Image (spheres, rainbow, N blue to C red):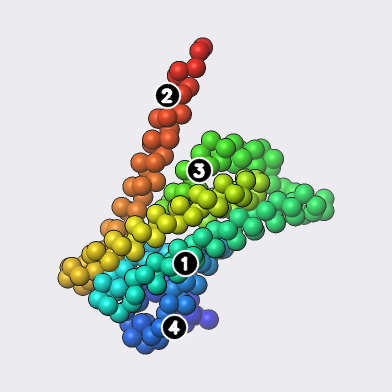
Amino acid sequence: MQEAFTFLKSIDTELYRYIEQYGLVMYIVLFFIVYAKTAFVVLTFLPGDSTVFASGTIAATGHLNVWVLFLIFFLATVIGDAQNYTIGVMIRRAKATSGRFSPLKYIPEKTITKATNFLESYGKIAITFSRFVPLMRTTVPLVSGFTSYKFRDFFINNCIGALIWTVVWLFTGLALGNIPVVADNLFISLILISFTGLIPAIIAFIVEYIKKYAKKTRQPQ
């Protein structure tokens, strides 16, 4: 068990060695890691962004196929988030039908109302860019299902977000993979690149906030 945990935690920094050891099986492993990270809140510790970036750097050397990686990462995050949404729906239903002393009964309605209002105001942008923000990538899909956010809207924005996320991380890794300083200092590169992954979410949030603020100021007092 400890060996499996170590393997999963080090998949991004030791990916090249694992590919040499396990070959094409690593495509399945990479799919599972990204899928599991987005599908289950308890597995949020798994390396996601860094795994996709590291895969891109290795694809630049020809040891992995970038288009196969693109497909598996895109599908993994779309399916994982959809499952996380479904879990949220199941929790909501369980709360509604659970017994008097069930722990689910202690989820305050005020908290649910706040989450619902948040998604009504920022739903599209939150779902699209949440995967760039630690913790939000797993909680937003769960809360979307729990608050009965319309699945069609969730799925569309989930796909858009998955596409942006995959392109940003995978092709950034592909573009930088042939730069010796990046390849030779992958761990440091992963840390630095992780901060740039927050930029799209920050910009999008600021733009949305300005639009809503401008709309309020235009309303008659």
> What is the secondary structure assignment of the residue under circle 3?
helix
Left or right: 32, with 191 as reference point: right
The residue singled out by tag 4 in the image is 25
Q: Are marks 3 and 2 in contact (CB under 8 Å)?
A: no
Q: Residue at x 46, y 49 (%)?
A: 128
Q: CA distance from mark 3 to mark 4?
A: 35 Å
Of tags 3 and 1, the one toward the viewer is 3
Q: Residue at x 54, y 58 (%)?
A: 81
The residue singled out by tag 3 in the image is 124
The residue singled out by tag 1 in the image is 34
Question: Callout 3: 10 Å neighbours few (<14), some, many (20+)?
Answer: some
The residue singled out by tag 2 in the image is 214
Residue type marked 4: Val
* Coordinates of residue 106 in the picture (x, y in percent): 72, 47
* Coordinates of residue 179 in the picture (x, y in percent): 18, 68
Question: Callout 2: 10 Å neighbours few (<14), some, many (20+)?
Answer: few
* Coordinates of residue 188 in the picture (x, y in percent): 26, 64
Residue type marked 3: Lys
> What is the secondary structure assignment of the residue under circle 1?
helix
Sequence-wise, the earlier of marks 3 and 1 is 1
